[in-house]
Amino acid sequence: MRPSLLVSLILSVVALVLIALFALDSYFVVEPTEMAGVRRLGQVTTATPLGPGLHFKLPLVDQVDRLQVSLDTFKLDKLVVNTIDNQPIAVTVGLTYRIPPQAVLPLLYEVGRPGNFDITENFQRIVADRTAKIFAQQNTTRISENRDQILNSLKSVLSNDLGNLYHIEVVDFQISGIVYSDSFRASVEAAVKAKNEAVAAENTVNRIKYEAQQTVERANGEAAAKLKLAEADRQSAILSAQGKAEAIRLEGESRAAVLRMNAEILKTSPLVIDLARADRWNGILPSTLFEGTNATPLLSLSPLEAAEKSEVIPRAPGVHDLPASR
């Protein structure tokens, strides 16, 4: 092959390669989750970010800078912060964010180096600083109790600051882990143990008080029962005495009524006494008479004298003669 022909062939191949390179480098494709900007010899040539699709540029001159704009999460692992009581704790936090179209070009060309190299480094500084400030206002013993409040405060602060600085949209903020220092955990365990012992002691005291109260209540119950029994005995004795008194009164009234009836009978029939004397005769003349009668008292005579003076006993009408006692 002649040298001139060889040179022509080489030049043709080089030209084809250059044309292919220029052709391949004259367009680019932006993915659905991306937006892009173009620099030409160091100057930004795009006024608005380029969305998904096919775009053209000058080969070997224009530089394409891509930025992920879909929902993404930035994680900061084991960030050491101090609380208000000067206790160090290690926290793991996560920031879920989205980059709106108006923030693409500022993030690509106004934050750090051109492109997306320094974005997460700036996020890290802001997130670490704001997290440290929020935890510096908290007491270590109240962190678990105030966790929701801390989350809301951090989300609000980061939404405001990252929005003003980088024009990004904060969707959520998470605290995925909190690790306390060994000394704090030891002090918490000691406090919990002391509290449990105090609760146990208090429960013992309450049990003793309860048992004492039960004893007092039992004693009061027994005393009240004895008082009721004594009251019942007293009432029973009173009722028994009243019953006996009433019986005595009724018996007296009955006897008085009998005596009054006998007196009335004697007033109307004086001979009744003779009948009574005859019914009760034992051979000895009575020494007393019925009360309230006007009969002449009998002399108290011995049986022998009475027999000598009288052979028969005077009888009332209708009463049979009785033989005299000898």
Image (tube, rainbow, N blue to C red):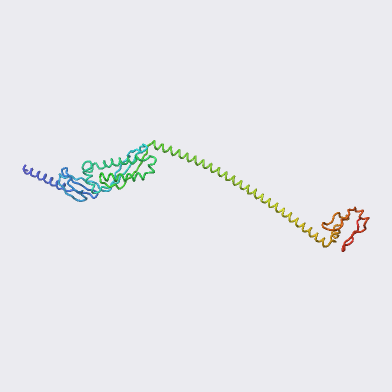
**Furthest residue toward right:** 308
Residue nearest the viewer, comparing 307 with 48: 307
Residue 156 pos. (x, y %):
31, 46
Residue 323 pos. (x, y %):
91, 59
Total numbered circles: 0
Residue 109 pos. (x, y %):
21, 43
**Furthest residue toward bottom:** 318
The quarter of the rendered structure image containing the C terminus is bottom right
In the shown orientation, is residue 316 left or right of residue 16? Answer: right
Residue nearest the viewer, comparing 315 with 112: 315
Residue 227 pos. (x, y %):
63, 47
In the shown orientation, is residue 281 left or right of residue 186? Answer: right
In the shown orientation, is residue 182 left or right of residue 122? Answer: right
The quarter of the rendered structure image containing the N terminus is top left
Relative to 9, does residue 182 appear above or below in the rendering?
above
Residue 61: image quadrant is top left
Residue nearest the viewer, comparing 110 with 236: 236
Residue 13: image quadrant is top left
**Furthest residue toward top:** 183
